[in-house]
Amino acid sequence: MAYLNLFWPEGTVLPRMLPLDIFHMETGGCTGCALELRSLSRALVEGHSDIRFVSTPRQAGLLLVTGSLTVEMAPVVELAWQAMPGTRLLAAVGDCAVDGGVFTPSYAVLGGVEGRARASLLLPGCPPSPAEILDALIRWRMQGEDELSA
Amino acid sequence: MTQVADLIRSGTPAACPGRFVLDEQGWRDMAAALSHSALPLLGLWSDGGQVHALFMEGTRPLMASVAVTDGRYLALSPARAGASASERIMQDLWGIEAMGATASAPWLDQGRWPVTWPLRDRPPPAPAPPEGVEFIDDATIVQAGGTVLGHGPAEGDFNAPFHLRLGVPGERIMQVHSRMGYAHRGLCARMRGATVAQAARLVARIDATATVAHQQAFADALAVMEGNGAGGMHDAALFVGELGRIMAHLDTLAVAAELLADRRFVILAATLLERVRQACRDMCGSRLLFDVLPPAGGNERVMSLPAELLAELRAGCTALRRLFWRPRGMAMQARGRGILRADVAGHWGIAGCVGRAGGVESDPGPYGSRPPAVWPDGSRAMAGDVTARLALRLHEVETAVEILSTLDAVALTAPPVGEYGSGEGIGCAEGPAGPVWHWLRVENGRVAAWWCGDPALLLFQALPQVLSGAMYEDVPLILASLGLSAASADL
């Protein structure tokens, strides 16, 4: 019955495990980053991870953007951002989402989120591998927890 | 067929082999003769001064061009339905009007671009963007008081963005409107003035699911331009092409299995996919095979798959096939959904994997780049439904694994990157979704005009017929089985 010590009022304060719900948006690119995110999503589901990709921004705490942010997609990103509840954060994955990548300058492309919005996580790469994305997400999360506990 | 081809060949031969420039009357005669001919139209585009139409005569490309007079030309959509989206795209990008077209509404430009007709030399500024999107529903939907449901552009499903407006008066979809342009990046404008190497990097990033096919078609077009001829795939290009096909099909199969809740299939397909991607990274330095073919990826290297991986892929394919066809498996669940019949595919000019699943006999390419696909189970499964498409993809994975196992270590030799002068060329490669075409004109080493023809554009036009009668819940599965990519349709 060793687990009962978890119910004792004394002892170390255990960190509260908050799930990370991510809503992904492809905003106009080659979808390479999205393919790698799809692989990551399958691995997370299989591993019963508390990092999850959700199908609506209304459940999400993190908006993860890939692609070069086309002019047509900008209002859609804004709508998704407004639909997110509570504390919300923005992440940009891939060269295109960070600064537009190879698709800038163009009349149809705004060129990523850098300089337009304050992103919590910027991960360049063309495309970054699922391991790199997961590593960045976990590091960013732990960094956030350290800051909270400090 | 002969008559139209003869009419085209009566024009003035142009710089590109197989292209003939017609006068206005010649184009008019060709458009009139098309309605009595079966000559397949594969693409329609403009370079500003001329409009070009690409046909396939047997296994050879045949192009007809006509000068744009007063910003107009005679439309081909009354005779070839698949030309409609291309005509609307030309109107959006160049402001060139197709006279007598079956539809004239914008396809790409939804009013948010800062300029109108952006590919013109001096594009006029655009009016203020619209406040909302206006759709006109069919009278039947309005009368039935039916529900209208949307799909996209952001579904959290890792696909390129597009929007579908689906009218569902009862339990089945009756009306489908698509709204494109969300994924349009202005690639035509980006290509103009770019060096050939810069253009090749952009071409590799048109669509990650068919990146090798785009690189191959672009390299073929360059070879034709240089006068070397598209002499078929050499071993290295065939090798990476089959790797790309395996990855695209496995990903599609895994997505479909996720939607059908077949967890064992998902795990196996995703594991094989990850193995292949890791092998690609080890061999070529890119998990998705970006920049592997010259001129963008000119590094000389020797590529080979480890024997263990080939054995694993072969065993994996057998296991996937068993899971797919097992009782109450994916094949049984998806049967009869999302049917794309041969006549619908022929109406829109759809070829490739999706067309073949419906029974269309399509040639894999004009240059015989790949051994012709053989349908495994005869005509029984050519129903054109989701099951047939997924089964054909699974079969193509098995075929690709066999092709790879016949190739030993292949050496990718980079051709000497010389100065590209001036010229014109066209190339084709069979991608996972169908034939991919690239045409380009180079002037003094820089791209002056470029066009890319991707099967996705035809598939998007055929969506109303594929989705009509389907259940709303089946839409993601049907879209996944078609392998739709808005990134390559919008460019």
Image (cartoon, rainbow, N blue to C red):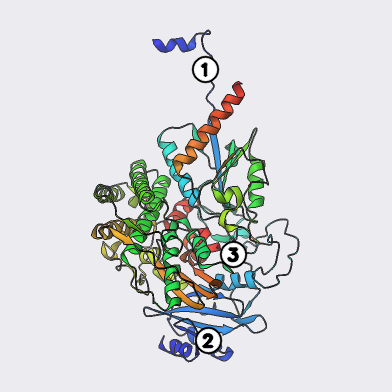
Q: Is residue A149 above or below residue A77?
A: above
Q: Residues within 10 Å of mark 2 (few under 14, many from 20)?
A: many
Dot 3 amino acid type: Arg
Q: Is residue A95 left or right of residue B69?
A: left
Q: Earlier in the sequence, mark 3 or mark 2?
A: 2
Return the residue nearer the eye: B206 or B269: B206
Q: Is residue B73 left or right of residue B196?
A: right
Q: Chain of mark 2?
A: B
Q: Is residue B23 above or below residue B360?
A: below
User: The residue tagged with tag 1: helix, strand or loop?
Assistant: loop
Q: Which residue is mark 3?
A: B190
Q: Is residue A138 above or below residue B431?
A: above
Dot 1 amino acid type: Leu
Q: Are marks 3 and 2 on the same chain?
A: yes
Q: Are marks 1 and 2 on the same chain?
A: no
Q: Residues within 10 Å of mark 1 (few under 14, many from 20)?
A: few
x then y, percent, for residue B38: 42, 81
Q: Whole-Å distance between the Cαs marked 3 and 2?
A: 26 Å
Q: Whole-Å distance between the Cαs marked 1 and 2?
A: 77 Å
Q: Residue at x 29, y 47 (%)?
A: B323
x then y, percent, for residue A75: 67, 51
Q: Chain of mark 1?
A: A
**Numbered circle sitting on residue B2:** none
The picture quadrant where one finds residue B401 is bottom left
Q: Whole-Å distance between the Cαs marked 1 and 3?
A: 54 Å
Q: Which residue is mark 2?
A: B21
For discs 3 and 2, the disc positioned in front in the rendered view: 3
Return the residue nearer the eye: B220 or B138: B220
Query: From this viewpoint, is residue B464 visible?
Result: no
Q: Which residue is mark 1?
A: A14
